[in-house]
Image (tube, helix red, strand yellow):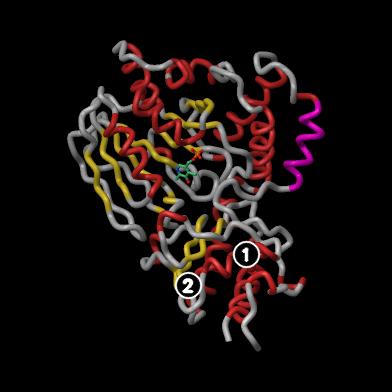
């Protein structure tokens, strides 16, 4: 067979996934969620977020998350506008008392460390890093916040969440943006579990959510009482007070909340977090076993224990990943591109719960077909 350009490749219909969205955020939105925008949404969109119908929607998201994560009754679900990136600034103002420790193992984990380092009111953060493809381990230290990343979306590495030994009053804050809803975790090991809804929750971006333990709430109150200057839109105490009455400080995107609530209900009604985690784990074994069986593919994360079940990164050899992604895109299979700053000949595949494991299996067949047709 002669070599084809990516645009010339036509993948046979029987190999195509039912849904071709494999991005790591924004990620696949289920058709039923979109439908809800015109049914439930017809009554909610365009109405006040200070009135009962939208407040009940926010309440439903908060209750649904509490049950999905199996949180004790004394935990708070806090939300605000701006996504996880804004939450780093929120945390820099309202969660770090003096000094934080950051485990840095990719682009996202480095950003919170940079925000803390730049804050004039905080001491220099302690940064423990490892090269992309693995993760560091926290060491007990003279800090008041430990910053973890449950799943480093830029590299496809997931880390277990364990509170450091003898960490006293320090709180553990976890960036779970791409992990929340797809990987199990134990609330006794964590104080703040924050994320945004465009990954496992299959909604749109633009809001941040933080599940906060009583210890985290005590920290928020303590910093508030210290009279530190905090811009109101980044003030976690203001966000906490608003969230407790099922509101946000300023206007939220009601459409995003509807998509989000539909996904949380779908997750809970199918069996909760364990069901979601199992579904992503099934997709992940398909991807990694496929890559290990191919001469042209290798899982980027060498240690199987560190491989993510929600974001897989696969190095390619002897074939250009950009051409593979272009051929897939020309056939409606999109966003398999690697994280650009990682700079590897790699594909990256989202395996969030909304993505059907059988579609992940179809994706591997599509890649086989493309590679076969791109190379002689
Ligand atoms: C996507 C992502 C972010 C950024 O989320 P935004 O809502 O776009 O700010 C932060 N951290 C991790 C781990 C992510 O996957």
Indicate the secondary structure of the residue bearing disc 1: helix
The span shown in magenta is 31-42
**Helix, strand or loop for the magenta stretch, by majority:** helix
- Confirm whether residue 341 shows in the render: yes
Say left or right for 168 vs 344: left
Task: Name the one closer to the observer, 260 or 331.
Answer: 331
Q: Quadrant of residue 341?
A: bottom left
**Where residue 376 sits: x, y (%)?**
58, 87
Give the residue at mark 1. Answer: 360
At 41% across and 29% down in the image, what residue appears? 213
Camera-nearest residue between 341 and 47: 341
| Residue 36 belongs to magenta span | yes
Give the image quarter of residue 278.
Answer: bottom right
N-terminal of the pair, mark 2 or mark 1, is 2
Element class at badge 2? strand
Image quadrant holding the N terminus, namely: bottom right
10 Å crowding of disc 1: few (<14), some (14-19), many (20+) = many
Front-most of 242 and 110? Answer: 110
Residue 147, horizontal then vertical, whole percent: 33, 39
| Residue annotated with mark 2 | 316
Q: Residues within 10 Å of mark 2 (few under 14, many from 20)?
A: many
Residue 202, given in percent of the width and then of the height, sits at 63, 44
Viewer-side label of 2, 1: 2
């Amino acid at each position: 067979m002669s070599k084809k350009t990516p645009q010339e490749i036509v993948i046979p219909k029987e190999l195509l996934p039912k849904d071709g969205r494999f991005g790591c955020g924004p990620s696949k939105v289920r058709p039923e969620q979109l439908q809800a925008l015109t049914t439930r949404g017809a009554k909610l969109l365009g109405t006040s977020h200070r009135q009962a119908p939208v407040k009940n929607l926010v309440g439903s998201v908060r209750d649904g998350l509490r049950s999905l994560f199996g949180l004790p009754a004394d935990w708070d679900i806090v939300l605000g506008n701006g996504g996880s990136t804004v939450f780093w600034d929120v945390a820099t103002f309202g969660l770090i008392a003096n000094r934080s420790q950051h485990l840095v193992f990719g682009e996202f984990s480095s950003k919170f460390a940079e925000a803390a380092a730049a804050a004039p009111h905080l001491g220099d953060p302690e940064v423990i890093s490892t090269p992309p493809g693995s993760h560091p381990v926290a060491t007990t230290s003279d800090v008041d916040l430990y910053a973890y990343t449950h799943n480093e979306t830029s590299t496809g590495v997931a880390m277990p969440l364990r509170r450091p030994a003898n960490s006293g009053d320090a709180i553990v804050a976890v960036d779970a943006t791409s992990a929340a809803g797809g990987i199990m975790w134990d609330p006794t090991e964590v104080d703040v579990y924050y994320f945004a809804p465009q990954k496992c929750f299959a909604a749109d971006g633009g809001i941040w959510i933080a599940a906060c333990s009583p210890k985290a709430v005590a920290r928020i109150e303590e910093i508030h009482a210290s009279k530190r200057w905090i811009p109101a839109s980044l003030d976690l105490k203001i966000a906490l007070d608003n969230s407790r009455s099922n509101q946000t400080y300023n206007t939220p995107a009601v459409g995003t909340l509807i998509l989000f609530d539909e996904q949380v209900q779908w997750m809970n009604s199918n069996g909760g977090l364990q069901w979601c985690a199992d579904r992503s784990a099934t997709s992940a074994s398909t991807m990694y076993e496929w890559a290990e069986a191919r001469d042209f593919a290798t899982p980027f994360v060498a240690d199987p224990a560190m491989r993510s079940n929600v974001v897989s990164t696969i190095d390619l050899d002897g074939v250009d990943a950009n051409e593979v992604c272009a051929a897939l895109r020309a056939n409606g299979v999109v966003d398999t591109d690697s994280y650009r700053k990682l700079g590897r000949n790699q594909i990256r595949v989202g395996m969030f719960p909304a993505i059907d494991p059988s579609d992940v299996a179809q994706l591997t067949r599509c890649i086989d077909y493309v590679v076969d047709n791109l190379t002689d």
